[in-house]
Amino acid sequence: MEIVKLKKRGFEKIERNHLWIFSDEIEEVLSDKGVGIANIFYDDKFVGRGLYNGNTKNSLKFLTYKDEEINLNFFRRRFEFAKLRRKQLSPFRREINSEGDLLPGLIVDRFDKTLVVQVRSVALESLKNIIVDALLESYDPESIYERSDFESLPEDGLSRSKGILYGSMPEIQTLEENGLKFAVDVVNGQKTGFFLDQRESRAFVRNFSGSKRALDLFTYTGGFALNMAATGMNVDGIDISESDLEIAKANATINDLDVNFIKKDAFDLTGLGIYDLVIADPPSLIKKKEEQKKAFDLLKNLTNQIFLHLSDDGVVCLCSCAYNINSEMLEKVVLASAMINERTVRALGWTGLPIDHPHLLSMPESDYLKCFWFESVRKKMY
């Protein structure tokens, strides 16, 4: 077992319930492997246990204050606690939301009898069999499928893993949300197959049912587009992925809705018309705080284009799923673009993570999803 001795700064973070300790907040490490479960000390006093990876800057993820084994019983208790707070929710939900469920490095999405697992910690990889056994005892699924095939690795040393962990190969399933049906492909879809975290935003968009023309950028499988079409809007859905658009078209068909899906780079709005409502939910764009300027410029360029295709009193929702892009940055992006395009904008509100995606108030990093809703005010009002 690894032994990690904290500096005062690292200990103070744990005291205020922050679960991440960085390498410069560690005084000393006694290790023969460099990765694994660590006993944590400060001033020679036992503090707790966590996941240690000496090969990455975010070296330690805190698990428990107790002197307890990180074993089957540990994970089963955490799973049962997480399941209890979700018992009134749909069987299509996030079951384990990493830090928000006090299990940093682990994501589990549930699609009825199928669990989709994503392991984001090297130290957790060696515990995968135990995690699967605990999931079987707590949820009794028909299949458990892993989607740790990250586009960019969340932690140094992780392996990109994808495949069956238990049961048979999952088939495409049908999820129902807001009265609409969506096909979910957990094997070939993005992330775990469906963006469960945008549930509240997809419902919120229906508040603008008076809009005539709508644009859904980065539509994926049509989540926002179908919700807008269901209220009678004339909708264009844009995405670069042909395979995702095929599922989006199938989703429109099974819901008897008409959406014009277009294969196109959603960062380039050339050739599109004028819209009363625009949804922009781009990929995370950046992984590091040092890349904030890059993200600002990308979002500003996108928002500039949106204003060129927005009616005088149109509504926009600009989203970010990167925790390094905060709410203040999104507002600054919109304000900068509004000034360039001689628009006056009025904030309408925010949507974010739903109840099955809890985050810790002590960890702003765990509140990753932010959707800023705003409207353009007619110039002739002045």
Image (spheres, rainbow, N blue to C red):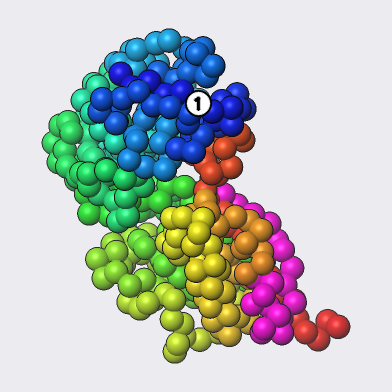
Residue 47 screen position, x and y as percent: 50, 16
Up the image or down, 80 lies above or below 298; here it is: above
Amino acid beneath label 1: Leu
Which residue is outermost to the bottom? Answer: 271
Residue 251 screen position, x and y as percent: 33, 60
Which residue is outermost to the right? Answer: 382
Up the image or down, 359 lies above or below 295; here it is: above
- What residue do we see at 60% from left, 55% from top? 326
Residue 339 visible in this rendered orientation of the protein: yes
As for residue 347 lying within the magenta part, the answer is: yes
* SS at circle 1: strand
Q: Is residue 139 left or right of residue 67?
A: left
Q: Is residue 94 left or right of residue 362?
A: left
Q: Is residue 344 left or right of residue 42?
A: right
Residue 370 screen position, x and y as percent: 57, 54
- What residue do we see at 29% from left, 30% from top? 35
- Front-most of 270 and 290? 290
On the rendered image, what quadrant is the C terminus found in?
bottom right
- What residue do we see at 53% from left, 78% from top? 301
- What residue do we see at 71% from left, 84% from top? 342
As for residue 47 lying within the magenta part, the answer is: no
Up the image or down, 142 lies above or below 220; here it is: above
- Residue indicated by mark 1: 6
- Front-most of 123 and 242? 123
Residue 305 screen position, x and y as percent: 54, 81
Residue 20 visible in this rendered orientation of the protein: no
- Front-most of 328 and 280? 328
On the rendered image, what quadrant is the N terminus found in?
top left
Q: In the rendered structure, which segment of residues is drawn in magenta? A: 334-352
Name the image quarter holding residue 148: top left
Within-10-Å neighbours for mark 1: few <14, some 14–19, many 20+: many
Name the image quarter holding residue 332: bottom right
